[in-house]
Image (cartoon, rainbow, N blue to C red):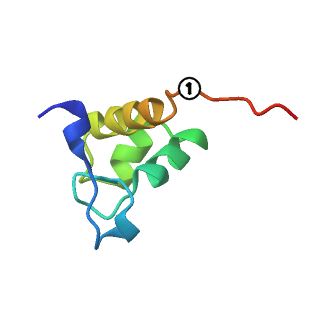
């Protein structure tokens, strides 16, 4: 399984937002946990269905989503 294969998007689940391996845990939920200081160990303890690679996949997915050219609009 490739890292990004851990991210799933299903129209009828979580409003079509990216989730972790088909579970109803959105990538954004996992990112918020990390942003608020939760350690990997805490996350894995609180969500026993998760694997360490799921956290890495969410971070990688987010990084790739922001990797695009931004065009400045002259004012």
Residue holding disc 1: 69
Q: Of helix, strand and loop, which one carries label 1?
A: loop
* Foreground of the two, 58 or 73: 73
Q: Position of residue 18 (x, y in %)?
A: 36, 54
Q: Is residue 59 above or below residue 21?
A: above
How far from the left and from the top, in percent, is residue 42?
43, 43
Q: Which of the image's four quarters has the C terminus?
A: top right
Q: Quadrant of the N terminus?
A: top left
Residue 41: image location, x then y, percent: 39, 38
Q: Residue furthest right?
A: 75
Identified at 55% across, 48% down, the residue is 32
Res. 6 visible in picture: yes
Q: Quadrant of residue 51?
A: top left
Looking at the rendering, which quadrant does residue 64 occupy? top left
Q: Quadrant of residue 25?
A: bottom left
Which residue is painted at 25% across and 36% down in the image? 4
Which residue in the rendered view is the most extreme toward the front? 74
- The x and y percentages for residue 12 are 28, 73
The vertical placement of 75 against 17, above or below, is above
36 relative to 33 in the view: left or right: right
* Disc 1 residue crowd, few under 14, some 14–19, many 20+, Cα 10 Å: few
Front-most of 50 and 73?
Answer: 73
Q: How many marks?
A: 1
Question: Among all residues in the image, which is located at the extreme left?
Answer: 1
Q: Residue at x 45, y 36 (%)?
A: 65
Where 2 sits versus 32, above or below? Answer: above
Residue 37 visible to an observer of this rendering: no
Residue 40 lies left or right of residue 74; in this view the side is: left
- Return the residue nearer the eye: 47 or 14: 14
């Amino acid at each position: 399984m490739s890292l990004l294969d851990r991210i799933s998007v299903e129209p009828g689940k979580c409003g079509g937002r990216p989730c972790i391996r088909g579970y109803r845990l959105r990538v954004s939920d996992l990112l918020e946990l990390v942003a608020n200081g939760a350690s990997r160990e805490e996350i894995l303890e609180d969500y026993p269905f998760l694997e360490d690679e799921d956290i890495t996949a969410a971070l990688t997915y987010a990084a790739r989503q922001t990797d695009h050219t931004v065009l400045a609009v002259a004012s």
